[in-house]
Amino acid sequence: MVELAWISVAELARMIRGKDVSPREVVQAHLERIAALDGTLHAFITVCADAALAAARAAEADLVAGRAVGPLHGVPIGLKDLFETKGILTTAGSRILADHVPMRDATVVERLRAAGAIVLGKLNMHEFAYGAEGWNEAFGDVRNPWDATVARIPGGSSSGSGAAVAAGLCPGALGSDTGGSIRIPSSLCGITGLKPTYGRVSRSGVFPLAWSMDHVGPMARTVADCALMLQAIAGHDPADETTTVLPLPDCVGSLTGEVRGLRVGLLRGFFVDSCLPGVVAAVDGAAKTLETLGARVEPAFLPAAEHVASAFFAILASESLAYHASWFRARGHEYSADVRTRLARGAFVTGMQYVRAQQVRRRVRDEINALFARHDLLLAPTTPIPAPALAQREVELPGGTRNLTVALISLTSVWSFAGFPVCSLPCGFADGLPVGMQLVGRPFDEATVLRAADAYQRSTDWHRRRPPVGG
């Protein structure tokens, strides 16, 4: 039963369709692992054991009856507790919503269920997605499974999603990403995460952090699994006016393993100057692997990235406070201390600063688009450091001491700010901890991003490494 917890989403779906294993066996294996390990990891807020087993029995009945099944039939999936789930507690990681039971499913949850996925439970997170670390005063800090001796952060805000997938508590999960919240935990926990293009996936029924930068995407152990999950959740949604009407290419079918001739810009300057040497070495090694596969790798620079931080903050702080204004006035004391402080800062952003930040966004997008005139993909580290200790608030980097939060989002926020698709995947280890790299593509070209990332995973085994928890 333990081995079932390490089988990929795509392989589980194939095995279930072929009746090599039953949905009930798969769900039970993951529930047993959650029971054994989650008391330490704190990855789940709510485990839907009875409902998941009932759904598994129904999935088995469909197979026996020969009824048509979806591409994720019988596969258990975890959901960041930011996604509304009908009849299931949805807290957004906050005391404010400690008793909130929605009357509907978020659109992406509806689509996962329609594809046959089984909701295993709701995953822990940084409160209201406002943090890159994964701290949570209300439900406990999520622990990174990669260090059995030192309590380390998993990264946030999709902290439970990262830890659960990495530890084999669920084969895939949904996360959200406003400044790196899918990619940071994917990097620090050694898994794969995809932030699609802004507008590719509906956010209806998802608690917002900053509406103009929020993204929803899959997290799993392989690129192929992320492609399969994206195929299920993407597409126009009348309930979210920001979603595109552009059709999603066949991302699963695009995974040919072929990258010959792809032009990859290896980002230097800002994207490596503050990184620890072990991180830079791992990403440079990944660039060499892509070259051996036939890609053309050249140095690339994005000077505008240095101007993103202040503009990103102006938009994030003002949009988040705008959403939370009523709760913050009436129930401000119920927020975690760090989130309360971050929300309060939004009151100091002026209208002029917000407008100027949007102007910066336009210039950054233009500069990125100019890079894509010469390159098909961009490659960079995901985070400048591997997972720090839970108690750390500052980190030592080549450029000096930096605030932990600022360091964690420094290399990821630009792509959420600009809305480009980007995949984080493991590319090595530094000091025994996972290192992640980002592959960035043109808007709505998730297929090329996933194709290159999958080709890299076919040639390496970083994504197959297991953390030292539970066997």
Image (cartoon, rainbow, N blue to C red):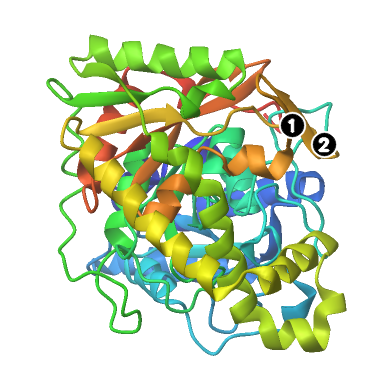
Circle 2: element type = loop
Would residue 237 be found to the left or right of residue 311 on screen? Answer: left
User: In this rendering, would 383 be left or right of 232?
Assistant: right
Checking the image for residue 345, the label placed there is: none
Q: Is residue 78 visible?
A: yes
Taking depth in this image into account, of 438 and 174 the one nearest to the observer is 438
Q: Which residue is mark 1?
A: 388
Name the residue type under label 2.
Gln
In the picture, residue 116 is in which quadrant? bottom left
Circle 2 residue: 392
Asked whether 9 or 107 is in front, the reply is 107
Q: Is residue 69 above or below residue 438?
A: below
Q: Residues within 10 Å of mark 2 (few under 14, many from 20)?
A: few
Residue 459 position in % (x across, y down): 32, 17
Residue furthest out toward the left: 261
Residue 49: x and y in percent read 64, 65
Q: In this view of the protein, can residue 426 be seen by the observer?
A: no
Callout 1 environment at 10 Å: few (<14), some (14 to 19), or many (20+)?
A: many
What residue do we see at 56% from left, 33% from top? 383
Disc 1 versus disc 2: distance between alpha carbons?
A: 7 Å
Q: Residue at x 80, y 62 (%)?
A: 139
Instruction: State left or right for residue 328 relative to residue 240.
Output: right
Q: Is residue 416 left or right of residue 67?
A: right
Q: Are marks 1 and 2 in contact (CB under 8 Å)?
A: yes
Residue at 75% in and 44% down: 37
Q: Is residue 109 above or below residue 36?
A: below
Measuring from the top left, give residue 159's x and y in whole percent: 64, 50
Q: Residue at x 29, y 62 (%)?
A: 200
